[in-house]
Image (cartoon, helix red, strand yellow):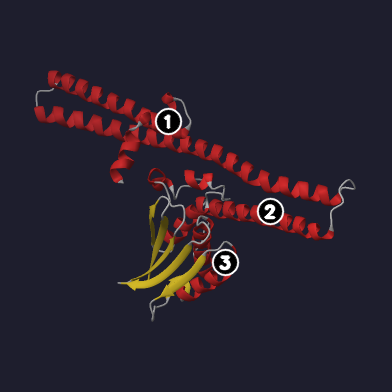
């Protein structure tokens, strides 16, 4: 995984395409240019120094000093361009995703109200309820997206307080499992939970952990096809409680796994399934777990399923 990440960073053309900027504005290309400048400058410094400075140690010191200064300068410049390029990319993705995610429910609501309020359509009473349910569901989709955007905005601005208190994680998880059972059963998915007895309490923010568990259960059920299974398990290992949620869903393609916790990212097969989502849930989930002093990771095989884990200190 680390080797693949390093190769990706060294692939200048791929990185430029990712940021959507010209080659000369690409941070990786600029870093290569600055690296070349450092090498050339170091060689020139050595040649000039060895000609005018008698002591070899002084020449080496001058060359090293110049190289270190230029390296720090180039790193600072590259990081600045990288942040600007990333901000530009995220802005474009934000506009595309939000406009797409909002357009669909707004269009559905618009057409439903036009049909219900128009004199040209004679809608039977039995059908009117279906239209109102459709409106309600689409409003819920928009509220969900806006909530995700607000959470991400607070994370980015560092205004995401964690109010820890002593809680029983198994009770919190059990409550969310009961909530989602109706949704899972309607999709012909078996949702079950198990945990080892005598789990100790943890110090965490219950409202934030509730959001984490909701996101993970929602994803597992959403991306699992009919007659599938979603299993949750809690256990204590050392000084941590380990939470796991395993599904028999579509899985995550190997090439997409390194991006799965990025903002607005959705795996290619998830887009093909046409399941709704903003690509913000897992980003928020990871941020919450890390701010709670824990870690989150996953294992996945495409077309076989995914298991997400997170650990929290006792």
Contact, CB < 8 Å: mark 2 with mark 3? no
Contact, CB < 8 Å: mark 1 with mark 3? no
The image shows residue 303 at horizontal and vertical percentages of: 43, 51
Crowding near the residue tagged with mark 3, few <14, some 14–19, many ≥20 C-alpha atoms within 10 Å: some
- Seen in the picture, residue 184 relative to 301 is either above or below; the reply is below
Q: Nearer the viewer, mark 1 or mark 2?
A: 2
**Residue in the image at 48% along x and 73% along y:** 165
The image shows residue 54 at horizontal and vertical percentages of: 9, 23
SS under mark 1 = helix
- Left or right: where does residue 141 sit relative to residue 291? right
The image shows residue 291 at horizontal and vertical percentages of: 44, 60
Crowding near the residue tagged with mark 1, few <14, some 14–19, many ≥20 C-alpha atoms within 10 Å: some
> What numbered label is drawn on residue 16?
1
**Residue in the image at 57% along x and 54% along y:** 148
- Seen in the picture, residue 143 relative to 267 is either above or below; the reply is below
> What numbered label is drawn on residue 35?
none
SS under mark 2 = helix
SS under mark 3 = helix
**Residue in the image at 67% along x and 43% along y:** 103
**What residue would you read off at disc 3?**
185
Q: Nearer the viewer, mark 2 or mark 3?
A: 3
Spatial distance from mark 2 to mark 3, Cα to Cα? 21 Å
Please tell me which of labels 2 and 3 falls first in the chain.
Answer: 2
Location of residue 233 (image quadrant): bottom left
**What residue would you read off at disc 2?**
138
Location of residue 293 (image quadrant): bottom left
- Left or right: where does residue 59 sit relative to residue 236? left
């Amino acid at each position: 995984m680390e080797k693949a990440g390093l190769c990706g960073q060294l692939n200048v053309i791929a990185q430029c395409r990712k940021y959507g900027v010209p080659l000369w504005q690409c941070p990786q290309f600029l870093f290569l240019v600055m690296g070349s400048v450092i090498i050339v400058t170091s060689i020139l410094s050595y040649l000039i120094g060895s000609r005018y400075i008698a002591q070899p140690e002084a020449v080496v010191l001058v060359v090293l000093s110049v190289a270190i200064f230029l390296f720090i300068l180039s790193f600072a410049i590259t990081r600045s361009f990288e942040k600007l390029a990333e901000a530009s990319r995220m802005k474009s993705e934000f506009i595309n995703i939000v406009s797409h995610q909002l357009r669909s429910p707004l269009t559905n609501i618009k057409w439903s109200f036009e049909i219900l309020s128009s004199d040209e359509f004679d809608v039977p009473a039995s059908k009117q309820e279906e239209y109102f349910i459709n409106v309600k569901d689409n409003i819920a989709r928009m509220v969900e997206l806006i909530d995700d955007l607000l959470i991400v905005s607070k994370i980015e601005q560092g205004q995401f307080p964690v109010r820890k208190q002593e809680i029983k994680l198994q009770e919190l998880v059990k409550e969310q499992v009961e909530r989602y059972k109706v949704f899972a059963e309607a999709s012909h998915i078996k949702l079950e939970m198990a945990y080892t007895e005598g789990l100790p309490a943890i110090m965490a923010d219950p409202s934030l952990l509730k959001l984490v568990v909701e996101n993970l259960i929602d994803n597992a059920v959403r991306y699992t096809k009919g007659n599938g299974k979603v299993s949750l398990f809690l256990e204590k290992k050392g000084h941590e409680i380990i939470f796991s949620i395993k599904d028999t869903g579509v899985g995550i393609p190997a090439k997409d796994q390194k991006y799965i916790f990025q903002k607005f990212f959705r795996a290619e097969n998830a887009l093909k399934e046409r399941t709704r989502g903003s690509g913000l849930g897992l980003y928020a989930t990871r941020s919450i777990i890390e701010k709670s002093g824990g870690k989150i990771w996953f294992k996945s095989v495409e077309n076989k399923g995914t298991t997400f884990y997170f650990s929290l200190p006792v």
